[in-house]
Amino acid sequence: VDMFTVLTIFLLQNFKVDAIKLKQNVPLPEASAVKKLKPAHVVVVTQDKIFLDETPVADFITVKEQQDWVIAALKEGLEKRIKETREKAESTLKEKIKSSLNSNSKLTPEEIEEEEKEKKKEWGRVTVQADKEIDFLTIKKVLFTATEAGATLINFAVSQKPKDELVK
């Protein structure tokens, strides 16, 4: 029951993802509270496979039956992609600081710190697109693996409930 409560809370805080390329053949759960998300690494969980940014990384049945919480191939792939995104964001920030030092408009330490926080959120974003029929334990393994790989913000892709259902 506690697991379903956690899943319900996640779904209530769900986000509609249009800035991210989603697989069209994955039936998503519905939610009434949705937000538009910024680009992120996308983990797709289907009845057959688990994908990371459209690349198959694991077989669904194998992950479902495994005792280990970490999905090794997914963790490895996410770590690599998060590292690449972080390095790109850090180099952009360094260039911004350099140009600020060379120009008259210098960034304050507080502004630099705020910029670093924003960049950290940017490179650690992961969106999970899971078939609505997938069991919660498998989703939990995906979430655990994402956090172990360094994800700083995990969101779920959902479909928005039709407006007429919200009134009932």
Image: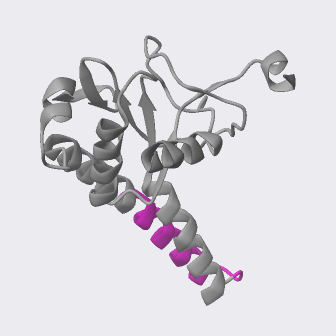
Q: Predominant secondary structure in magenta? A: helix
Would residue 92 be counted in the magenta stretch?
yes
Point out residue 10 in the picture as x, y percentages from the top left corner.
55, 45
- Magenta segment: 88-105
- Find residue 167 and report its image quarter: top right
Point out residue 33 in the picture as x, y percentages from the top left corner.
72, 38
Would residue 98 be counted in the magenta stretch?
yes
Q: Name the residue located 20 percent from the left edge and 32 percent from the top edge.
A: 64
Viewer-closest of 154 and 47? 47
- Find residue 55 and report its image quarter: top left
Q: Name the residue located 38 percent from the left edge and 53 percent from the top edge.
A: 85
Q: Is residue 107 visible?
A: no
Q: Name the residue located 31 percent from the left edge and 53 percent from the top edge.
A: 144
Q: Is residue 167 visible?
A: yes
Position above or below: 90 against 8 = below
Viewer-closest of 43 and 64? 64
